[in-house]
Amino acid sequence: MVDPQKSSSGAHDVHPEEQSEGLSKGLTNYGDRGFSLFLRKAFIKGAGYTDRALDRPVIGIANTGSAFNPCHGNMPQLIEAVKRGIMLAGGLPMDFPTISLHESFSRPTSMYLRNLMSMDTEEMLRAQPMDAVVLIGGCDKTVPAQLMGAASVGLPAVQLVTGSMLTGSHRGERVGACTDCRRYWGRFRAGEIEAQEVADVNDQLVASVGTCSVAGTASTMACIAEALGMTVPGGATPPAVTADRIRVAEQSGRVAVQMARSGLTIDKVLTAEAFENAMRVLLAMGGSTNGIVHLAAIAGRMGYTLDLRALDAMSRQTPVLLDLKPSGDHYMEDFHAAGGMATLLHELRPLLHLDAMTVTGRTLGEELDAAGPRFTQHVVRPLNRPVYPQGGIAVLYGNLAPDGAIIKQSAADARLMEHEGRAVVFENAQDLANRIDDPALDVGPDDVLVLKNIGPKGAAMPEAGYLPIPRKLAAAGVKDMLRISDGRMSGTAFGTIVLHVTPEAAVGGPLAWIQTGDRIRLSVAARSIEWLISEEELRARREARPVRSPEADRGYERLFLQSVTQADQGADFDFLMATESKGSVPRS
Ligand code: FES
Protein backbone atom coordinates (compact mmCIF):
# COMPACT_ATOMS: atom_id res chain seq x y z
CA MET A 1 0.00 0.00 0.00
CA VAL A 2 1.10 3.53 -0.70
CA ASP A 3 2.52 5.38 2.29
CA PRO A 4 -0.08 8.05 3.02
CA GLN A 5 2.50 10.41 4.51
CA LYS A 6 4.82 10.33 1.53
CA SER A 7 4.51 13.23 -0.86
CA SER A 8 4.85 12.68 -4.58
CA SER A 9 6.35 15.31 -6.82
CA GLY A 10 3.97 14.60 -9.69
CA ALA A 11 3.06 12.23 -12.48
CA HIS A 12 6.57 12.09 -13.95
CA ASP A 13 7.96 10.18 -10.96
CA VAL A 14 5.21 7.55 -10.88
CA HIS A 15 5.82 4.10 -12.24
CA PRO A 16 2.34 2.99 -13.20
CA GLU A 17 3.31 -0.54 -14.25
CA GLU A 18 4.41 -1.18 -10.67
CA GLN A 19 1.33 0.24 -8.98
CA SER A 20 -2.14 -1.15 -8.65
CA GLU A 21 -3.40 0.85 -5.71
CA GLY A 22 -4.85 4.25 -5.10
CA LEU A 23 -5.30 6.52 -8.04
CA SER A 24 -3.14 4.29 -10.28
CA LYS A 25 -5.62 1.47 -10.08
CA GLY A 26 -7.73 0.47 -13.06
CA LEU A 27 -6.41 3.01 -15.52
CA THR A 28 -8.54 4.09 -18.44
CA ASN A 29 -7.24 2.45 -21.57
CA TYR A 30 -5.53 4.92 -23.92
CA GLY A 31 -2.84 2.42 -24.92
CA ASP A 32 -0.25 4.26 -22.78
CA ARG A 33 -0.46 3.68 -19.02
CA GLY A 34 1.81 6.58 -18.15
CA PHE A 35 -0.36 8.96 -20.14
CA SER A 36 -3.53 7.48 -18.61
CA LEU A 37 -2.32 8.27 -15.10
CA PHE A 38 -0.99 11.66 -16.17
CA LEU A 39 -4.40 12.55 -17.58
CA ARG A 40 -6.31 11.21 -14.59
CA LYS A 41 -4.19 13.25 -12.23
CA ALA A 42 -4.56 16.36 -14.35
CA PHE A 43 -8.33 16.11 -14.16
CA ILE A 44 -8.57 15.39 -10.45
CA LYS A 45 -6.19 18.27 -9.79
CA GLY A 46 -8.79 20.41 -11.49
CA ALA A 47 -10.80 19.81 -8.34
CA GLY A 48 -7.94 21.17 -6.24
CA TYR A 49 -6.31 17.97 -5.00
CA THR A 50 -2.57 17.89 -4.19
CA ASP A 51 -0.16 15.06 -4.95
CA ARG A 52 0.10 14.45 -1.20
CA ALA A 53 -3.63 13.77 -1.02
CA LEU A 54 -3.57 11.67 -4.17
CA ASP A 55 -0.88 9.38 -2.78
CA ARG A 56 -3.23 8.09 -0.08
CA PRO A 57 -5.29 4.91 -0.32
CA VAL A 58 -8.47 5.82 -2.15
CA ILE A 59 -11.66 4.87 -0.32
CA GLY A 60 -14.83 5.05 -2.38
CA ILE A 61 -18.11 6.01 -0.76
CA ALA A 62 -21.22 4.81 -2.60
CA ASN A 63 -23.60 7.73 -2.25
CA THR A 64 -27.26 6.77 -2.63
CA GLY A 65 -28.75 10.09 -1.59
CA SER A 66 -31.80 11.08 -3.62
CA ALA A 67 -34.69 13.46 -3.20
CA PHE A 68 -36.87 10.47 -4.07
CA ASN A 69 -35.48 8.49 -1.15
CA PRO A 70 -36.32 9.93 2.28
CA CYS A 71 -35.05 6.71 3.86
CA HIS A 72 -31.61 8.04 2.84
CA GLY A 73 -32.34 11.62 3.92
CA ASN A 74 -29.34 11.73 6.27
CA MET A 75 -26.90 10.89 3.46
CA PRO A 76 -25.04 14.26 3.57
CA GLN A 77 -24.30 13.90 7.30
CA LEU A 78 -23.25 10.28 6.87
CA ILE A 79 -20.92 11.06 3.99
CA GLU A 80 -19.32 13.88 5.98
CA ALA A 81 -18.70 11.52 8.91
CA VAL A 82 -17.40 8.69 6.70
CA LYS A 83 -15.00 11.13 5.07
CA ARG A 84 -13.80 12.26 8.50
CA GLY A 85 -13.13 8.65 9.49
CA ILE A 86 -11.25 8.01 6.26
CA MET A 87 -9.14 11.14 6.59
CA LEU A 88 -8.35 10.45 10.26
CA ALA A 89 -7.08 7.02 9.24
CA GLY A 90 -4.93 8.40 6.41
CA GLY A 91 -7.12 7.61 3.41
CA LEU A 92 -8.53 9.74 0.63
CA PRO A 93 -12.36 9.69 0.52
CA MET A 94 -14.02 9.82 -2.91
CA ASP A 95 -17.80 9.66 -2.92
CA PHE A 96 -19.68 8.79 -6.07
CA PRO A 97 -23.36 8.38 -6.92
CA THR A 98 -25.18 5.20 -7.78
CA ILE A 99 -28.82 4.35 -8.29
CA SER A 100 -30.99 4.83 -5.22
CA LEU A 101 -34.24 2.92 -4.69
CA HIS A 102 -37.13 3.78 -2.39
CA GLU A 103 -39.98 1.35 -1.97
CA SER A 104 -42.74 3.83 -2.62
CA PHE A 105 -41.02 5.62 -5.48
CA SER A 106 -40.06 2.66 -7.65
CA ARG A 107 -42.38 1.58 -10.41
CA PRO A 108 -43.38 -1.14 -11.02
CA THR A 109 -41.47 -2.43 -7.98
CA SER A 110 -38.14 -1.76 -6.34
CA MET A 111 -37.41 -5.47 -6.80
CA TYR A 112 -37.46 -4.93 -10.57
CA LEU A 113 -34.58 -2.49 -10.12
CA ARG A 114 -32.54 -4.22 -7.39
CA ASN A 115 -30.42 -6.13 -9.88
CA LEU A 116 -29.90 -2.99 -11.95
CA MET A 117 -28.64 -1.21 -8.81
CA SER A 118 -26.36 -4.15 -8.06
CA MET A 119 -24.95 -3.94 -11.59
CA ASP A 120 -24.47 -0.18 -11.23
CA THR A 121 -22.69 -0.69 -7.91
CA GLU A 122 -20.55 -3.52 -9.28
CA GLU A 123 -19.49 -1.67 -12.40
CA MET A 124 -18.74 1.61 -10.58
CA LEU A 125 -16.58 -0.29 -8.07
CA ARG A 126 -14.76 -1.93 -10.97
CA ALA A 127 -14.46 1.17 -13.14
CA GLN A 128 -13.21 3.71 -10.61
CA PRO A 129 -9.91 3.48 -8.77
CA MET A 130 -10.54 2.60 -5.14
CA ASP A 131 -8.78 0.39 -2.63
CA ALA A 132 -11.87 -0.13 -0.47
CA VAL A 133 -15.42 1.10 -0.41
CA VAL A 134 -18.01 2.20 2.12
CA LEU A 135 -21.45 1.28 0.80
CA ILE A 136 -24.18 3.52 2.18
CA GLY A 137 -27.62 2.04 1.76
CA GLY A 138 -30.74 1.64 3.81
CA CYS A 139 -34.09 1.33 2.09
CA ASP A 140 -35.11 -2.27 1.42
CA LYS A 141 -33.41 -3.17 -1.86
CA THR A 142 -30.40 -0.91 -1.56
CA VAL A 143 -28.37 -2.91 0.97
CA PRO A 144 -28.82 -6.23 -0.85
CA ALA A 145 -28.03 -4.56 -4.17
CA GLN A 146 -24.83 -3.08 -2.73
CA LEU A 147 -23.75 -6.33 -1.09
CA MET A 148 -24.47 -8.27 -4.29
CA GLY A 149 -22.45 -5.84 -6.39
CA ALA A 150 -19.56 -5.64 -3.93
CA ALA A 151 -19.49 -9.43 -3.53
CA SER A 152 -19.01 -9.79 -7.27
CA VAL A 153 -16.14 -7.29 -7.31
CA GLY A 154 -14.18 -8.64 -4.35
CA LEU A 155 -12.79 -5.36 -2.96
CA PRO A 156 -12.56 -4.65 0.75
CA ALA A 157 -16.02 -3.28 1.54
CA VAL A 158 -17.92 -1.99 4.57
CA GLN A 159 -21.69 -1.66 4.66
CA LEU A 160 -23.07 1.42 6.36
CA VAL A 161 -26.84 1.66 6.74
CA THR A 162 -28.70 4.94 7.04
CA GLY A 163 -30.52 3.80 10.19
CA SER A 164 -34.14 3.64 11.20
CA MET A 165 -36.61 6.50 11.38
CA LEU A 166 -38.04 7.70 14.68
CA THR A 167 -41.52 6.69 15.76
CA GLY A 168 -44.37 9.20 15.79
CA SER A 169 -47.42 9.73 17.96
CA HIS A 170 -51.02 9.71 16.84
CA ARG A 171 -53.70 10.67 19.39
CA GLY A 172 -51.58 9.27 22.19
CA GLU A 173 -50.57 6.10 20.36
CA ARG A 174 -47.03 5.41 19.26
CA VAL A 175 -46.87 4.68 15.53
CA GLY A 176 -44.22 3.86 12.96
CA ALA A 177 -43.89 2.75 9.37
CA CYS A 178 -44.97 0.55 8.13
CA THR A 179 -46.78 -2.04 10.24
CA ASP A 180 -48.95 0.76 11.57
CA CYS A 181 -49.49 2.10 8.03
CA ARG A 182 -51.07 -1.22 7.11
CA ARG A 183 -53.01 -1.47 10.37
CA TYR A 184 -54.55 1.98 10.00
CA TRP A 185 -55.28 1.45 6.32
CA GLY A 186 -56.95 -1.88 7.18
CA ARG A 187 -59.09 -0.11 9.79
CA PHE A 188 -60.03 2.54 7.26
CA ARG A 189 -61.01 -0.10 4.68
CA ALA A 190 -63.11 -1.86 7.30
CA GLY A 191 -64.92 1.42 8.03
CA GLU A 192 -63.59 1.57 11.60
CA ILE A 193 -62.02 5.03 11.19
CA GLU A 194 -62.88 8.12 9.16
CA ALA A 195 -60.96 9.68 6.26
CA GLN A 196 -59.85 12.55 8.52
CA GLU A 197 -58.18 10.18 10.97
CA VAL A 198 -56.38 8.27 8.26
CA ALA A 199 -55.15 11.64 6.92
CA ASP A 200 -54.00 12.67 10.41
CA VAL A 201 -52.06 9.48 11.03
CA ASN A 202 -50.41 9.90 7.62
CA ASP A 203 -48.51 12.84 9.13
CA GLN A 204 -47.18 10.76 12.01
CA LEU A 205 -46.26 7.37 10.59
CA VAL A 206 -42.85 8.51 9.32
CA ALA A 207 -41.57 10.86 11.99
CA SER A 208 -38.10 11.47 10.54
CA VAL A 209 -35.79 10.48 7.74
CA GLY A 210 -34.48 6.92 7.94
CA THR A 211 -35.71 3.43 7.22
CA CYS A 212 -38.89 1.78 8.46
CA SER A 213 -38.96 1.47 12.22
CA VAL A 214 -40.08 -2.14 12.56
CA ALA A 215 -38.56 -5.48 11.52
CA GLY A 216 -39.23 -4.72 7.87
CA THR A 217 -36.82 -5.54 5.11
CA ALA A 218 -34.56 -2.54 5.73
CA SER A 219 -34.12 -3.37 9.44
CA THR A 220 -33.75 -7.04 8.58
CA MET A 221 -31.05 -6.35 6.02
CA ALA A 222 -29.27 -3.99 8.43
CA CYS A 223 -29.16 -6.75 11.07
CA ILE A 224 -28.21 -9.34 8.44
CA ALA A 225 -25.37 -7.10 7.26
CA GLU A 226 -24.03 -6.88 10.81
CA ALA A 227 -24.44 -10.64 11.32
CA LEU A 228 -22.54 -11.21 8.08
CA GLY A 229 -19.69 -9.19 9.57
CA MET A 230 -20.13 -6.53 6.89
CA THR A 231 -20.79 -3.56 9.23
CA VAL A 232 -18.78 -2.24 12.11
CA PRO A 233 -19.98 -3.66 15.45
CA GLY A 234 -23.23 -2.01 16.48
CA GLY A 235 -23.75 -0.72 12.96
CA ALA A 236 -27.28 -2.05 12.43
CA THR A 237 -29.49 -0.30 14.94
CA PRO A 238 -28.68 3.37 15.67
CA PRO A 239 -31.57 5.47 14.34
CA ALA A 240 -30.85 7.72 11.38
CA VAL A 241 -30.88 11.03 13.23
CA THR A 242 -28.75 10.08 16.24
CA ALA A 243 -25.17 10.82 17.21
CA ASP A 244 -24.61 7.07 17.44
CA ARG A 245 -25.41 6.76 13.73
CA ILE A 246 -22.89 9.47 12.87
CA ARG A 247 -20.23 7.79 15.01
CA VAL A 248 -20.89 4.50 13.20
CA ALA A 249 -20.35 6.36 9.93
CA GLU A 250 -17.02 7.79 11.10
CA GLN A 251 -15.93 4.36 12.30
CA SER A 252 -16.95 2.79 8.98
CA GLY A 253 -14.63 5.18 7.15
CA ARG A 254 -11.75 4.36 9.49
CA VAL A 255 -12.31 0.61 9.15
CA ALA A 256 -12.39 0.86 5.35
CA VAL A 257 -8.88 2.33 5.38
CA GLN A 258 -7.67 -0.48 7.66
CA MET A 259 -9.19 -3.02 5.30
CA ALA A 260 -7.50 -1.46 2.30
CA ARG A 261 -4.15 -1.59 4.09
CA SER A 262 -4.54 -5.16 5.36
CA GLY A 263 -6.11 -6.54 2.18
CA LEU A 264 -9.21 -7.76 4.00
CA THR A 265 -11.31 -8.44 0.91
CA ILE A 266 -15.02 -9.22 1.00
CA ASP A 267 -14.55 -12.93 0.28
CA LYS A 268 -12.78 -13.29 3.65
CA VAL A 269 -15.91 -11.95 5.35
CA LEU A 270 -18.73 -13.43 3.25
CA THR A 271 -18.01 -17.07 4.06
CA ALA A 272 -20.38 -20.01 4.58
CA GLU A 273 -20.12 -19.35 8.34
CA ALA A 274 -21.11 -15.73 7.85
CA PHE A 275 -24.17 -16.69 5.80
CA GLU A 276 -25.21 -19.20 8.48
CA ASN A 277 -24.88 -16.52 11.17
CA ALA A 278 -27.00 -14.21 9.03
CA MET A 279 -29.70 -16.86 8.61
CA ARG A 280 -29.79 -17.42 12.38
CA VAL A 281 -30.31 -13.73 12.89
CA LEU A 282 -32.99 -13.54 10.20
CA LEU A 283 -34.89 -16.35 11.92
CA ALA A 284 -34.32 -15.10 15.47
CA MET A 285 -35.43 -11.58 14.72
CA GLY A 286 -38.69 -12.64 13.06
CA GLY A 287 -37.25 -10.78 10.11
CA SER A 288 -38.69 -9.98 6.73
CA THR A 289 -39.36 -12.86 4.36
CA ASN A 290 -37.57 -10.76 1.75
CA GLY A 291 -34.39 -11.44 3.69
CA ILE A 292 -34.40 -14.98 2.30
CA VAL A 293 -34.56 -13.80 -1.31
CA HIS A 294 -31.80 -11.26 -0.75
CA LEU A 295 -29.58 -13.65 1.19
CA ALA A 296 -29.97 -16.21 -1.59
CA ALA A 297 -28.89 -13.57 -4.10
CA ILE A 298 -25.88 -12.37 -2.08
CA ALA A 299 -24.83 -15.97 -1.37
CA GLY A 300 -25.23 -16.76 -5.07
CA ARG A 301 -22.73 -14.02 -5.92
CA MET A 302 -20.21 -15.80 -3.65
CA GLY A 303 -20.91 -19.23 -5.15
CA TYR A 304 -23.24 -20.56 -2.46
CA THR A 305 -26.72 -22.00 -3.07
CA LEU A 306 -29.29 -21.32 -0.39
CA ASP A 307 -30.72 -24.67 0.73
CA LEU A 308 -34.31 -23.96 1.77
CA ARG A 309 -34.79 -27.37 3.43
CA ALA A 310 -31.68 -26.86 5.56
CA LEU A 311 -32.89 -23.36 6.37
CA ASP A 312 -36.17 -24.82 7.57
CA ALA A 313 -34.28 -27.30 9.78
CA MET A 314 -32.32 -24.35 11.18
CA SER A 315 -35.61 -22.54 11.77
CA ARG A 316 -36.89 -25.38 13.94
CA GLN A 317 -33.88 -24.84 16.26
CA THR A 318 -33.83 -21.05 16.24
CA PRO A 319 -36.53 -19.34 18.29
CA VAL A 320 -37.64 -15.76 17.68
CA LEU A 321 -36.00 -13.70 20.42
CA LEU A 322 -36.51 -10.18 19.18
CA ASP A 323 -39.74 -8.59 20.36
CA LEU A 324 -40.12 -6.25 17.41
CA LYS A 325 -43.14 -5.43 15.29
CA PRO A 326 -44.72 -7.04 13.31
CA SER A 327 -43.98 -10.29 15.22
CA GLY A 328 -43.70 -8.46 18.57
CA ASP A 329 -44.34 -5.08 20.18
CA HIS A 330 -41.27 -2.84 19.90
CA TYR A 331 -39.61 -0.60 17.34
CA MET A 332 -36.00 -0.38 16.10
CA GLU A 333 -35.13 2.53 18.39
CA ASP A 334 -36.12 0.31 21.36
CA PHE A 335 -33.89 -2.44 20.03
CA HIS A 336 -31.02 0.02 19.83
CA ALA A 337 -31.63 1.20 23.40
CA ALA A 338 -31.62 -2.47 24.45
CA GLY A 339 -28.06 -2.86 23.19
CA GLY A 340 -28.85 -3.61 19.56
CA MET A 341 -27.30 -6.52 17.77
CA ALA A 342 -24.75 -7.22 20.52
CA THR A 343 -27.62 -8.15 22.85
CA LEU A 344 -29.25 -10.41 20.26
CA LEU A 345 -25.95 -12.01 19.25
CA HIS A 346 -25.07 -12.65 22.90
CA GLU A 347 -28.32 -14.59 23.31
CA LEU A 348 -27.71 -16.50 20.08
CA ARG A 349 -24.07 -17.16 20.95
CA PRO A 350 -24.40 -20.96 21.29
CA LEU A 351 -25.87 -21.10 17.77
CA LEU A 352 -23.34 -18.86 16.02
CA HIS A 353 -20.00 -19.35 14.28
CA LEU A 354 -17.96 -17.09 16.54
CA ASP A 355 -14.83 -17.47 14.43
CA ALA A 356 -16.41 -15.76 11.42
CA MET A 357 -14.35 -12.76 10.30
CA THR A 358 -15.77 -9.23 10.34
CA VAL A 359 -14.75 -6.02 8.58
CA THR A 360 -12.78 -4.92 11.64
CA GLY A 361 -10.29 -7.74 11.14
CA ARG A 362 -11.53 -9.34 14.35
CA THR A 363 -13.89 -12.29 14.59
CA LEU A 364 -17.53 -12.06 15.59
CA GLY A 365 -16.66 -13.73 18.89
CA GLU A 366 -13.89 -11.21 19.59
CA GLU A 367 -16.24 -8.34 18.84
CA LEU A 368 -18.90 -9.81 21.12
CA ASP A 369 -16.36 -10.17 23.94
CA ALA A 370 -15.52 -6.51 23.51
CA ALA A 371 -19.12 -5.36 23.30
CA GLY A 372 -19.48 -4.25 26.90
CA PRO A 373 -21.58 -5.52 29.80
CA ARG A 374 -25.08 -6.83 29.34
CA PHE A 375 -27.96 -5.20 31.19
CA THR A 376 -31.63 -5.68 31.91
CA GLN A 377 -33.78 -4.93 28.89
CA HIS A 378 -37.13 -6.02 27.50
CA VAL A 379 -36.67 -6.24 23.75
CA VAL A 380 -34.42 -9.28 23.29
CA ARG A 381 -35.65 -12.39 25.06
CA PRO A 382 -33.37 -15.19 26.34
CA LEU A 383 -33.32 -18.49 24.48
CA ASN A 384 -35.43 -20.14 27.19
CA ARG A 385 -38.20 -17.52 27.02
CA PRO A 386 -38.64 -16.78 23.31
CA VAL A 387 -41.25 -14.63 21.57
CA TYR A 388 -41.96 -17.62 19.32
CA PRO A 389 -40.58 -21.15 19.85
CA GLN A 390 -39.26 -21.57 16.29
CA GLY A 391 -37.70 -19.27 13.72
CA GLY A 392 -39.89 -16.63 12.16
CA ILE A 393 -39.97 -18.32 8.76
CA ALA A 394 -41.04 -21.83 7.78
CA VAL A 395 -40.46 -23.42 4.38
CA LEU A 396 -43.33 -25.30 2.75
CA TYR A 397 -43.32 -27.86 -0.03
CA GLY A 398 -46.08 -29.68 -1.88
CA ASN A 399 -47.70 -30.08 -5.26
CA LEU A 400 -48.56 -26.38 -5.29
CA ALA A 401 -44.92 -25.38 -4.63
CA PRO A 402 -42.55 -28.14 -5.78
CA ASP A 403 -39.50 -25.87 -5.33
CA GLY A 404 -40.74 -24.35 -2.11
CA ALA A 405 -42.75 -21.53 -0.62
CA ILE A 406 -42.43 -19.73 2.68
CA ILE A 407 -44.65 -18.48 5.45
CA LYS A 408 -43.80 -16.04 8.22
CA GLN A 409 -45.22 -18.25 10.92
CA SER A 410 -44.38 -15.85 13.75
CA ALA A 411 -46.69 -13.21 12.24
CA ALA A 412 -49.47 -15.66 11.23
CA ASP A 413 -52.78 -16.49 12.91
CA ALA A 414 -52.32 -19.75 14.86
CA ARG A 415 -55.92 -20.67 13.95
CA LEU A 416 -55.07 -20.82 10.24
CA MET A 417 -51.74 -22.66 10.39
CA GLU A 418 -53.56 -25.96 9.84
CA HIS A 419 -56.27 -25.11 7.37
CA GLU A 420 -58.15 -26.46 4.40
CA GLY A 421 -60.31 -24.19 2.30
CA ARG A 422 -61.78 -23.32 -1.05
CA ALA A 423 -59.58 -21.29 -3.38
CA VAL A 424 -60.76 -17.88 -4.54
CA VAL A 425 -58.38 -17.12 -7.38
CA PHE A 426 -57.20 -13.85 -8.90
CA GLU A 427 -55.31 -14.13 -12.19
CA ASN A 428 -53.02 -11.15 -11.58
CA ALA A 429 -52.68 -7.97 -9.53
CA GLN A 430 -55.09 -6.05 -11.77
CA ASP A 431 -57.73 -8.74 -11.44
CA LEU A 432 -57.31 -8.53 -7.68
CA ALA A 433 -57.70 -4.75 -7.70
CA ASN A 434 -60.81 -5.04 -9.91
CA ARG A 435 -62.68 -7.59 -7.84
CA ILE A 436 -61.45 -7.77 -4.24
CA ASP A 437 -63.92 -5.17 -2.96
CA ASP A 438 -66.81 -6.17 -5.21
CA PRO A 439 -69.78 -6.77 -2.91
CA ALA A 440 -70.79 -9.59 -5.28
CA LEU A 441 -67.47 -11.44 -4.85
CA ASP A 442 -68.23 -14.99 -3.78
CA VAL A 443 -65.90 -15.30 -0.79
CA GLY A 444 -66.14 -16.38 2.84
CA PRO A 445 -63.78 -16.14 5.83
CA ASP A 446 -62.60 -19.76 5.50
CA ASP A 447 -61.73 -19.43 1.81
CA VAL A 448 -58.13 -19.21 0.60
CA LEU A 449 -57.26 -16.13 -1.45
CA VAL A 450 -54.86 -17.02 -4.28
CA LEU A 451 -53.04 -14.46 -6.42
CA LYS A 452 -51.13 -15.64 -9.50
CA ASN A 453 -48.60 -14.03 -11.78
CA ILE A 454 -46.76 -11.82 -9.30
CA GLY A 455 -43.56 -13.85 -9.30
CA PRO A 456 -40.16 -12.69 -10.62
CA LYS A 457 -41.07 -13.02 -14.32
CA GLY A 458 -44.78 -12.46 -13.86
CA ALA A 459 -44.57 -8.98 -12.35
CA ALA A 460 -41.07 -8.48 -10.89
CA MET A 461 -42.25 -9.84 -7.56
CA PRO A 462 -44.16 -6.92 -6.07
CA GLU A 463 -45.00 -6.88 -2.38
CA ALA A 464 -48.58 -7.71 -3.30
CA GLY A 465 -48.61 -11.04 -1.51
CA TYR A 466 -50.29 -9.30 1.40
CA LEU A 467 -53.70 -9.53 -0.29
CA PRO A 468 -56.23 -7.28 1.40
CA ILE A 469 -59.12 -8.90 3.20
CA PRO A 470 -62.17 -8.40 0.91
CA ARG A 471 -63.92 -5.26 2.10
CA LYS A 472 -67.17 -6.98 2.93
CA LEU A 473 -65.37 -9.52 5.13
CA ALA A 474 -63.18 -6.86 6.75
CA ALA A 475 -66.32 -4.90 7.58
CA ALA A 476 -67.72 -8.04 9.18
CA GLY A 477 -64.67 -8.24 11.44
CA VAL A 478 -62.48 -10.75 9.56
CA LYS A 479 -58.86 -9.87 10.38
CA ASP A 480 -56.93 -12.68 8.69
CA MET A 481 -57.38 -15.26 5.96
CA LEU A 482 -55.02 -17.77 4.38
CA ARG A 483 -53.49 -16.04 1.36
CA ILE A 484 -51.16 -17.57 -1.24
CA SER A 485 -49.11 -16.08 -4.07
CA ASP A 486 -45.87 -16.30 -6.00
CA GLY A 487 -45.02 -12.76 -4.92
CA ARG A 488 -43.46 -11.18 -1.86
CA MET A 489 -44.80 -9.16 1.01
CA SER A 490 -43.36 -6.31 2.98
CA GLY A 491 -41.49 -7.29 6.10
CA THR A 492 -43.75 -4.89 7.94
CA ALA A 493 -46.85 -6.94 7.07
CA PHE A 494 -48.49 -9.69 9.09
CA GLY A 495 -51.02 -12.46 8.55
CA THR A 496 -51.26 -16.08 7.42
CA ILE A 497 -49.60 -15.52 4.10
CA VAL A 498 -47.81 -18.06 1.91
CA LEU A 499 -45.28 -16.37 -0.37
CA HIS A 500 -42.62 -17.04 -3.02
CA VAL A 501 -44.48 -20.06 -4.43
CA THR A 502 -41.89 -21.61 -6.74
CA PRO A 503 -41.94 -22.16 -9.66
CA GLU A 504 -44.13 -19.13 -10.29
CA ALA A 505 -47.26 -19.15 -12.45
CA ALA A 506 -45.62 -17.16 -15.27
CA VAL A 507 -43.09 -19.92 -15.99
CA GLY A 508 -45.64 -22.72 -15.78
CA GLY A 509 -45.59 -23.50 -12.07
CA PRO A 510 -48.66 -25.37 -10.77
CA LEU A 511 -50.15 -22.09 -9.54
CA ALA A 512 -50.84 -21.24 -13.20
CA TRP A 513 -53.71 -23.73 -13.39
CA ILE A 514 -55.47 -23.33 -10.08
CA GLN A 515 -59.11 -22.18 -10.30
CA THR A 516 -61.70 -20.78 -7.96
CA GLY A 517 -63.43 -23.67 -6.24
CA ASP A 518 -60.34 -25.91 -6.00
CA ARG A 519 -59.33 -26.90 -2.49
CA ILE A 520 -56.00 -26.16 -0.81
CA ARG A 521 -54.60 -27.60 2.40
CA LEU A 522 -51.93 -25.89 4.48
CA SER A 523 -50.11 -27.61 7.31
CA VAL A 524 -47.33 -25.52 8.78
CA ALA A 525 -46.59 -28.35 11.24
CA ALA A 526 -46.01 -30.73 8.31
CA ARG A 527 -44.45 -27.92 6.23
CA SER A 528 -46.81 -28.73 3.39
CA ILE A 529 -48.95 -26.80 0.94
CA GLU A 530 -51.15 -29.15 -1.05
CA TRP A 531 -53.58 -28.56 -3.88
CA LEU A 532 -56.25 -31.26 -3.75
CA ILE A 533 -56.37 -32.07 -7.45
CA SER A 534 -55.95 -35.29 -9.40
CA GLU A 535 -53.05 -35.76 -11.80
CA GLU A 536 -55.54 -36.30 -14.67
CA GLU A 537 -57.33 -33.03 -14.00
CA LEU A 538 -54.06 -31.12 -13.73
CA ARG A 539 -52.82 -32.64 -17.01
CA ALA A 540 -56.05 -31.70 -18.75
CA ARG A 541 -55.82 -28.11 -17.55
CA ARG A 542 -52.18 -27.86 -18.63
CA GLU A 543 -53.03 -29.08 -22.13
CA ALA A 544 -56.05 -26.80 -22.43
CA ARG A 545 -54.17 -23.65 -21.44
CA PRO A 546 -50.39 -23.71 -22.02
CA VAL A 547 -48.38 -20.94 -20.33
CA ARG A 548 -46.32 -18.42 -22.30
CA SER A 549 -43.64 -16.64 -20.28
CA PRO A 550 -43.73 -12.86 -20.61
CA GLU A 551 -41.26 -11.25 -23.01
CA ALA A 552 -40.21 -7.70 -23.83
CA ASP A 553 -38.88 -6.13 -27.04
CA ARG A 554 -36.16 -3.91 -25.65
CA GLY A 555 -34.22 -2.36 -22.82
CA TYR A 556 -33.80 -3.37 -19.24
CA GLU A 557 -37.18 -5.11 -19.23
CA ARG A 558 -35.93 -7.47 -21.94
CA LEU A 559 -32.77 -8.21 -19.97
CA PHE A 560 -34.83 -8.73 -16.83
CA LEU A 561 -37.31 -11.14 -18.38
CA GLN A 562 -34.58 -13.12 -20.13
CA SER A 563 -32.35 -13.42 -17.09
CA VAL A 564 -34.23 -13.27 -13.79
CA THR A 565 -34.11 -16.46 -11.74
CA GLN A 566 -36.79 -17.84 -9.45
CA ALA A 567 -37.25 -16.77 -5.83
CA ASP A 568 -35.32 -19.73 -4.42
CA GLN A 569 -32.24 -18.46 -6.30
CA GLY A 570 -32.71 -14.93 -5.09
CA ALA A 571 -34.36 -13.59 -8.26
CA ASP A 572 -30.89 -12.52 -9.35
CA PHE A 573 -29.91 -12.45 -13.00
CA ASP A 574 -28.48 -15.80 -14.04
CA PHE A 575 -25.41 -14.21 -15.63
CA LEU A 576 -24.50 -12.32 -12.44
CA MET A 577 -24.28 -15.36 -10.20
CA ALA A 578 -20.85 -16.80 -9.43
CA THR A 579 -19.70 -19.32 -12.00
CA GLU A 580 -17.88 -21.47 -9.46
CA SER A 581 -19.91 -23.36 -6.84
CA LYS A 582 -18.79 -23.44 -3.21
CA GLY A 583 -21.70 -25.64 -2.10
CA SER A 584 -24.87 -24.86 -0.24
CA VAL A 585 -25.74 -22.90 2.89
CA PRO A 586 -26.75 -23.55 5.55
CA ARG A 587 -24.70 -26.73 5.55
CA SER A 588 -26.97 -29.44 6.96
FE1 FES B 1 -37.54 2.67 2.91
FE2 FES B 1 -39.33 1.19 4.43
S1 FES B 1 -39.71 2.44 2.70
S2 FES B 1 -37.17 1.30 4.52
Image (spheres, rainbow, N blue to C red):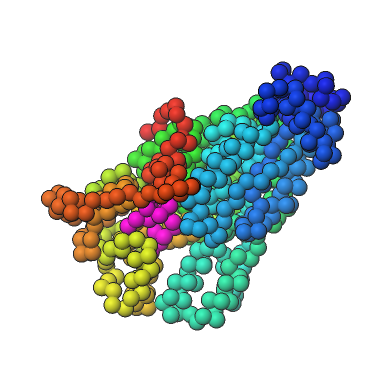
- Asked if residue 343 shows in the view, the reply is no
Q: In the figure, 122 relative to 162: above or below? A: above
The residue under the point 72% across, 47% down is: 79
**Range of residues picked out in magenta:** 452-467
Q: Position of residue 65 (x, y in %)?
A: 66, 52
Res. 337 image quadrant: bottom right
Q: Quadrant of the C terminus?
A: top left
The residue under the point 69% across, 32% down is: 129
Magenta highlight: main SS: loop
Considering depth in this image, is 61 or 247 the residue closer to the camera?
61
Residue 213 left/right relative to 288: right
- Asked if residue 583 shows in the view, the reply is yes
User: Residue at the left extreme?
Assistant: 536
Res. 559 image quadrant: top left
Considering depth in this image, is 313 or 107 the residue closer to the camera?
107
Q: In the figure, 140 relative to 86: above or below? A: below
Residue 266 left/right relative to 2: left
Q: Where is residue 244 in the image (x, y as percent from the top left)?
A: 70, 50
The residue under the point 53% across, 57% down is: 106
Res. 532 image quadrant: bottom left
Q: In the figure, 157 relative to 452: above or below? A: above
Per the image, is 581 magenta?
no
Per the image, is 454 magenta?
yes
Q: Where is residue 306 in the image (x, y as percent from the top left)?
A: 41, 38
Residue 155 left/right relative to 539: right
Residue 142 left/right relative to 581: right
